[in-house]
């Protein structure tokens, strides 16, 4: 999976599904993976729906993990797997009103307030927020470049002007910590793909550092290299949960992704998306002419 450039999160989830499959099937040896493989996979996937009532997306993830195992690792592709499919309907996403957003922001302070303001102001996913690097923030154009987003795609999203002074101060503080790391022999950061080999010293450049770095030096689970990684996603969601708990009038189930849905909904309400659509449509018509 690493050779094929899969994300670490995908790697972890696929390995967990394979372990669950082996444990569920009560396998005692590797040879049992090949015996009646399709039947075992069908029973496992069906139990996820019938016995555990999982969502369709969860069952699909388990199926994709097992397809990868048999096709790429065992070189024995699965054929005609007919498991009971999940009929669980996707839930309507939770959307906050502008008033509710203000109430939650009033309970946030410091870095937590800054991170949530970027989630809401730019419609970022939580994974995109924590992996944001210094060089991807453009203060002059008031925009953030998201690298390797969902589907391995890059995109540009707005940077709220109100967040700029706070973010600039945070990055200045972040630079001081980076210089301290360099002074004691650290300061390197994970680089995607083969950039570490192409640019041997780039990992210690400030532009590549995470904007929201972890407080502690940790060991990289893939390379065993000690360095400062980005903040954990759970810390962001925990701060949001605490803030929502302090708001007596907000009774919705709020997570980091809720601010992304709210961002899109509020753009629709103000007509921003429709304005952008008209501009893009005009460009397409001009090109055709």
Image (spheres, rainbow, N blue to C red):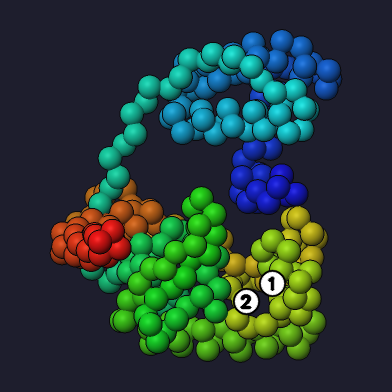
Asked whether, in this view, residue 186 is left or right of residue 48, the answer is: right
Q: Secondary structure at mark 2?
A: helix
Q: Locate residue 134: give its quadrant.
A: bottom right
Q: Residues within 10 Å of mark 2 (few under 14, many from 20)?
A: some
Q: Locate residue 78: give its quadrant.
A: top right
Q: Secondary structure at mark 1?
A: loop
Q: Is residue 85 visible?
A: yes
The residue labelled by disc 2 is 208
Q: Locate residue 271: give its quadrant.
A: bottom left
Residue 184 locus on image (x, y percent): 78, 84
Q: Residue at x 70, y 23 (%)?
A: 77
Q: Of tags 2 and 1, which is closer to the observer?
A: 2
**Picture disc at residue 189:** 1
**C-alpha distance separating marks 2 and 1:** 7 Å
Q: Residue at x 54, y 13 (%)?
A: 82
Asked whether, in this view, residue 84 is left or right of residue 9, the answer is: left
Residue 71 locus on image (x, y percent): 71, 29
Asked whether, in this view, residue 232 is left or right of residue 181, the answer is: left
State if disc 1 and disc 2 touch (CB < 8 Å). Answer: yes
Q: Residue at x 83, y 18 (%)?
A: 31
Q: Nearer the viewer, residue 67 or 8?
A: 67
Considering only vertical position in the picture, is 266 above or below 36? below
């Amino acid at each position: 999976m690493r050779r094929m450039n899969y994300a670490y999160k995908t790697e972890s989830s696929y390995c967990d599904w394979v372990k669950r499959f082996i444990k569920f099937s009560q396998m005692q040896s590797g040879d049992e993976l090949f015996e009646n493989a399709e039947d075992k996979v069908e029973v496992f996937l069906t139990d996820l729906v019938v016995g555990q009532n999982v969502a369709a997306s969860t069952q699909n993830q388990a199926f994709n993990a097992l397809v990868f195992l048999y096709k790429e690792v065992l070189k024995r592709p699965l054929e005609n797997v007919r498991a009971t499919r999940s009929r669980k309907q996707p839930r309507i996403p939770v959307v906050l009103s502008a008033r509710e957003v203000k109430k939650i922001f009033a309970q946030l302070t410091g870095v937590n307030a800054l991170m949530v303001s970027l989630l809401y102001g730019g419609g970022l996913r939580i994974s995109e927020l924590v992996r944001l690097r210094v060089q991807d923030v453009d203060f002059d154009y008031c925009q953030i470049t998201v690298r390797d987003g969902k589907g391995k795609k890059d995109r540009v999203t707005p940077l709220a002007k109100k967040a700029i002074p706070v973010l600039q101060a945070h990055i200045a503080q972040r630079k001081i910590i980076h210089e301290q790391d360099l002074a004691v022999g650290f300061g390197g950061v994970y680089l995607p793909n083969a950039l570490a080999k192409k640019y041997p010293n780039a990992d210690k450049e400030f532009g590549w550092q995470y904007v929201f770095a972890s407080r502690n030096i940790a060991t990289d689970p893939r390379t065993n290299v000690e360095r400062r990684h980005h903040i954990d996603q759970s810390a962001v969601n925990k701060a949001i949960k605490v803030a929502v708990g302090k708001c007596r009038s907000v009774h919705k189930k709020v997570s980091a992704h809720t601010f992304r849905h709210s961002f899109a909904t509020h753009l629709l309400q103000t007509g921003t998306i429709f304005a952008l659509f008209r501009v893009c449509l005009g460009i397409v018509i001009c090109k055709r002419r």
